[in-house]
Every structure is written in C-alpha cells, then in structure tokens.
Image (cartoon, rainbow, N blue to C red):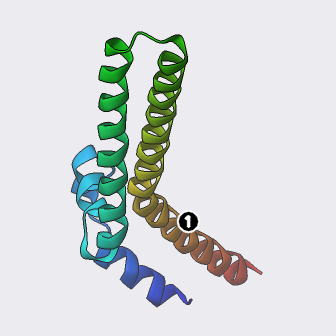
Amino acid sequence: MNDKQIKKIIEDTYDTSREDTIWTMISDFYNRKALSVIIVFWILMILFMAALVYSGIKFFKTEEIKSMIMYSTIFISCFIGGSIVKIFAWQMAHRHGIKREIKRLELRIAELSQIVKENR
C-alpha cells in the first residue's frame, strides 16, 4: 500500500467529528457487511436469554434437589454464554476504530520514512 492509497482510505473512512463515540461504534457494527454476523449474535442472545429465563423459573418451581442443581447449572451456563456473545460483539464493534488507528499509524510511518530519506 502506498502513501496515496493510505491517505485516500483515511479521508474516505475517517471523520474527526465521529471519533470513537458509542454511536459510531454502533453504526459501524450494524452495517450491511456484517449482517450475517449480527443475525447470529441476536439469535444466540435470544436463545441464551430464553433458556436463562426458563431455567430460572423452573428452578423456583421444582422441589427436588437434583432438578434444582440442573436448572441452576443451566442458568449459570446460559448467563456465561450470553456474556461471551456480548463480549465478542463488543470486540466486533471496536474493530473498525482499531483499523482506522492502524491506517493512521501507517500514514505516519510513511511520512517519517520520507523525512528520513530526505535528510540523508
């Protein structure tokens, strides 16, 4: 990638007024490119939440200790699974900001290498 390509990418994708706010991360996350991933995230979260609520209700309605242990294990597993999905979605939301920062660093390195070449 040469300097002109990096500058063009940064000028096209980077807007200083939209720098790393929660709304920019959400708008970057919910774009057409990641639609299939977003659908999978939402399906997994709905499944985990449904199983979490179901096991929580069944836990308090059951009388047997063995069933209580099973429902509490399901509850905890669904809670952890939902948390993992949320963490992965959060990392996906941060991905675009990190890419912009890397592109800016590439541009700075290219500028510094030009300055070093000119000073020699």
Q: Amino acid at mark 1?
A: Leu
Question: Image point 29% across, 64% down: which residue?
Answer: 39
Task: Answer above or below: position of 113 versus 55.
Answer: below
Relative vertical location of residue 97 with respect to residue 12 in this rendering, above or below = above
On the image, the x and y values in percent for residue 41 come to 36, 56
Report x, y in % for residue 8.
37, 84
- Number of numbered callouts drawn: 1
Neighbour tally class for label 1: few under 14, some 14-19, many 20 plus, Cα within 10 Å: few
Residue 111: percent from left, percent from top:
57, 75
Residue 79 falls in which quadrant of the image?
Answer: top left
Residue at the right extreme, as displayed: 120
Compared with residue 83, is residue 1 higher up or lower down, i.e. above or below?
Answer: below
In front here: 73 or 83?
73
Quarter of the image where one finds residue 113: bottom right
Residue occupying the point 42% across, 80% down = 7
Taking depth in this image into account, of 6 and 89 the one nearest to the observer is 89
Could you tell me which quadrant the N terminus lies in?
bottom right
Residue 49 locus on image (x, y percent): 32, 38
Judge left or right: residue 17 versus residue 116. left
**What residue would you read off at disc 1?**
105
Check the picture and name the quadrant holding the C terminus.
Answer: bottom right
What's the residue at 41%, 9% (across, down)?
63
Dot 1 falls on a residue whose secondary structure is helix
The residue under the point 38% across, 18% down is 59
Can you say whether 114 is above or below 71 in the image?
below
Towards the viewer: 82 or 29: 82
Query: In the orientation shown, which residue stands out farthest toward the front?
Result: 64
The quadrant where residue 96 appears: bottom left
On the rendered structure, is 36 left or right of 117? left
